[in-house]
Image (cartoon, rainbow, N blue to C red):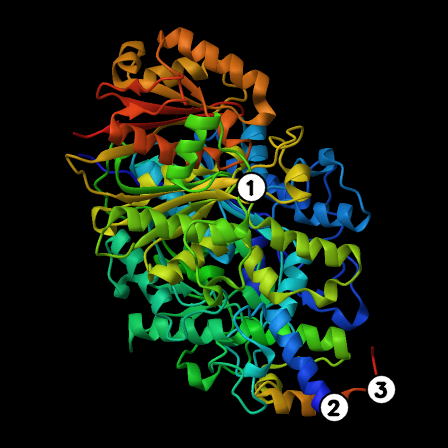
Amino acid sequence: MKTLTDELRTKIIETLNLEDIRPEDIGETDQLVGGELGLDSIDVLELVVMIEKDYGIRIDNKELGAKVFADLRSLADYIDTHSQGDPH
Amino acid sequence: MTGVRACITGIGLMTPISIGVPETRLALRGAKKRISPISLFTVSPESRLPVGEIGRDFIQAGIPRTHHLALTAAQEAMGQSEGPPDAVVVGVTTGGMLKTEAHFKKGETTPSHFAYHGPGTVGEVLAEKLGCTGPVITVSTACSSGAAAIKIALEMLRTRQAKRVLVGGADALCRLTYYGFRSLQLLDPAGARPFDVNRRGMSLSEGAGMLLLEAGPREAGEDMGEILGAGLSCDAYHPSSPDPEGRGALRAMRAALEDADISPSAIDYVNLHGTGTIDNDRAEARALNGLFGDKMPPVSSVKGAMGHSLAAAGAIEAGIAALSIMDGVVPGTTGCSRPDPQLGLDPVLQPVEADVETVLSNAFGFGGNNASVVIGRGDTGRLKETRETLPSLTVVGSACITGAGDMETSIRAVSEKGMCRGVLPMNELPLNLPSQMVRRWRRLTRMALSLGISAHKDARLPKDPFSIFFATGWGPLSETYGFLERLRFREESFSSPTAFVGSVHNAPAGQMAIHFGSTGPNVTVTGGDYSFEQALMVAGLMIKPYHTPTIVVGADAFHDPLSGIFDRSVIGHEEAADGGGGLCVMGTAHPSGTTIATRFFENSKNNPSILRALIQRLGGPERVRDAYGAVFAGIPGAFTKDGRDQLRTFCREAGFEGPVIDYRRFTGQFASASAVAAALGVRFVQDGKIPQGFAQTDVVGLDGKGVLMVGFGRFITAVEIISGG
């Protein structure tokens, strides 16, 4: 589990071009959207594309997205539960 | 002073429910849904969504689909009308993108295949085919483009810049918008259900709507209606989501009613933007409740039947509003079966007969752009007081970016090295914009923000700008390329929503509005090498004394390889260059200020006496010699030979022997080079002299005279910069 959250930290920073944020700045239970990271709805959709491409999981509605992208832990849990084998 | 009416004397419509006006009249009574799974291009089964299409066999060899749609609608609007229009104003977002995508999928990048890529080429084709020798203005404010174009056309008639204007909007389906809206999860898999409790998004579609507007008054019974007024506003809230309270939409509707000089109670029907997205419909419903309260007129959206055709929608629906008045029919809201009780809005579900005199039609878009148009029966409008000429704008601040850097660095570079061309590294752009503010944006938006903020800073005004006008020849190319590359590697279903939102031409202007909180009109125009002249002209048409201050920015970002594929003025020039200019202007006269005004804008095709007309418009040869201490000549690389010939003829016919500065020689070739020239021109007129290295090796005194910027080539434009002191 540790490795998946670390991997996600890096991917979030790269995908969203968060130049001023270091991976360790994103706590497992920090609010992702509307919190100190300054992410909004477009960022969530950008992460949806990244998750689909890199993990083969599609999150195609807002309600589900709000739950999954609540924080890093919920995102990692969702990916862990729904990934079928290792897509890498 | 007598006023001018904007009479609708022709309508042309191409929609998924109808080819032409007669079919549209029937279809509006039927309210059938014409939305089905996409077939125009191949998509993977899991990403196949319903759209509104105008038949796959609607093909014209030689020109892209958008151009073909626009031309077909334009020919219908022109009908039996004698003679060409004086001007063409058209809203377009993606131009020849569908064809561009097909070429990129095949790895084909020969420049000759992309001659019609730019959105501006749609209006150019219309002008050429219809024999219009006047200006061509291309509005690219995303989904409000077609309605915003009508506002500009209306002001052209009111200021007597034209007597007949062909105005409209056109967009074909393409992969960029299809996958872009899909990545934003804004497409309803069941087809659009506007204002329905279960709505989940819009249905993307295609089409064209064109109106021929002629200055009235005219004989009773001759017209198909009248544009009574129109209003623009900007949310200044978010790049792609509407202000949830609908405040921007409300401001646009109020501005339109005020412009038409009528009260909300005069509205018999509101043609809604009503896309079917959760957020649009909620914001629009709130705005309507704010405007009408408990006296809500009948309202409906046609987008459940025909989908959302982006730049075409506002123009198509203005045409539908006119038909609604003529036929006494309020169209139904196809797709809506159970209106969302939370919206407090009760749309007309099935078409009904009603006495309709006056219609309000809405079009809202990305960048928080809102436009509302009021359409009347044709004998109801009051005559508006009109202005006879375009007012001069007083420049209170200026800025530029070139390959050398900001204004000071650029002037020094030309004085010392004879040039300032090049591509400035991103981290050297003037102003260090915080990374959180620009992390989403690539080069063009960053340059535009830098220019807008610098020009405003230079003005040292306490007030933030109310209104933004932005010009770009080619739009955000980095974002466009990102998508085309995914297409080439068959990864289009992983399109980036950020890049899509950033790829629209008006993204930079929307971002400037958010930065400044500019809630007034926000207009982006595009048209290759003549884009900035368009923006200055539109600003002159639109700025009211209370709209102060206003930002006018022109910028283009060099992109390898796209600049060298799309831009004929860049092709063949080894040295890459980009940049832009920004002005902070006031609509009020200011005795000590430097003023800038568009004096001439015509199409040089089929226009043999164009240079004489230019000199005459400027007041004759003597005035040209007396008023201007220097001529800034803009000769785009695509028209080097013609441009030089035109310049020689102009100087000879005007007897002008002062310094002529061919500014692209030191700025390099890029579409918005004239924006750099304008910013420099303002500075030189303010200083009363031209620094060394520009005109001659020495400083040239202007002796209180102004600078005339003349653009040559496909269009001839003249922008006058003079000292008011």
Is residue B434 positioned above or below B139 on the image? below
Co-location on one chain, circles 3 and 1 = no
Of the residues under marks 3 and 2, which one precedes in the sequence?
Answer: 2
The amino acid type, in three-letter code, at marker 2 is Asp
Is B84 in front, or is B282?
B282
Q: Residue at x 48, y 75 (%)?
A: B279
Q: Amino acid at mark 3?
A: Gly
Q: Which residue is mark 3?
A: A85
Residue A80, numbered circle = 2
Measured from the top left, where is residue B22 in percent x and y? 57, 49
Please report the residue visible at 74 percent of the width from the left and 90 percent of the height from the top: A80
Which residue has dot 1 on it?
B423
Task: Determine the image quadrant of residue B198.
Answer: bottom right
Q: Looking at the image, is B117 positioned above or below residue B481?
A: above
State left or right for residue B123 relative to residue B621: right
- Distance of label 3 from label 2 (alpha carbons): 10 Å
**Label 2 to label 1, Cα distance in Å?**
45 Å
Q: Residues within 10 Å of mark 1 (few under 14, many from 20)?
A: many
| Quadrant for the C terminus of chain B in the image | top left
What residue appears at the point 37 percent right and 33 percent down from the top-left corner? Answer: B680
- Could you classify mark 2 by the number of other residues whose Cα lies within 10 Å: few (under 14), some (14-19), or many (20 or more)? some
